[in-house]
Amino acid sequence: MRRFFIILTALAVMAFLFAGAVYSEEAAKKADHAYVGAKKCSSKACHKDKHTSWAETAHAGAFDKLSAEEQKKPECIKCHSTGTLADGTLIEGIECEACHGPGKDYKSAKIMSKKKWKADPEAQMKMAVDAGLIVPDEKVCVRCHTKEGNTNFKEFKFAERVKLVHPVKEEKPAEK
């Protein structure tokens, strides 16, 4: 009986270690995605219409709303900036990648080709998501749109707010 428990314990430890290794590998894959900045997404007319409408939103100027002191605080930066480029430059404001995930891997023509999206939108979406694209939902927004630490908090209604932040109705990948 004792031998049974030793074997069972050993199997449980091995399963735990294996699960941890798989989880770490997945986390590492996601961590490899890098930010490119909104200019990369709006260049070559890929998402120029989206960039133009975004530039008129509060998200575009979110970093500028912070005081000089707040612009140095990690607890403020996490919701008023997008992330950091490979060279260490902070992406000021809430750009596309703050909600859609770092775009280095999913911005490629192989994934964002309009022709390929028309031919097989499901396969292209899977490729994009596998490459780091996030299809944002309310959970993405409420990471920052909360009362905690937000002195100007207004009730957050996802269905209403998404129309203000993402007013471009038709989602079309770039022509390639």
Image: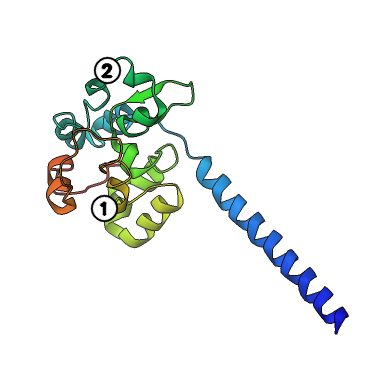
The structure's colour scheme is rainbow
* Residue 36 pos. (x, y %): 39, 30
Q: Would you say 40 lies left or right of 105 here?
A: left
Give x and y (percent) for residue 148. Answer: 30, 40
Report the residue at 27% width, 17% height from top: 67
Camera-side mark, 2 or 1: 2
Residue 3 at least partly seen: yes
The amino acid sitting under disc 2 is: Ser
Which callout, 2 or 1, points at the residue further toward the start of the chain?
Answer: 2
Dividing the image into 4 quarters, which one contains the N terminus? bottom right
Q: Position of residue 97 (x, y in %)?
A: 34, 38
Task: Point out the image quarter for the C terminus.
Answer: top left
The secondary element bearing badge 2 is classed as loop
Question: In screen coordinates, is 8 left or right of 55?
Answer: right
Q: Secondary structure at mark 1?
A: helix
The disc at residue 67 is: 2
Q: Which residue is mark 1?
A: 138
Residue nearest the observer in this picture, 141 or 51: 141
Please tell me which residue lies in front, 2 or 66: 2
Q: Position of residue 61 (x, y in %)?
A: 21, 25
Q: Kindly tell me whether residue 82 is visible in this rendering.
A: no
Q: Disc 1 residue type?
A: Glu
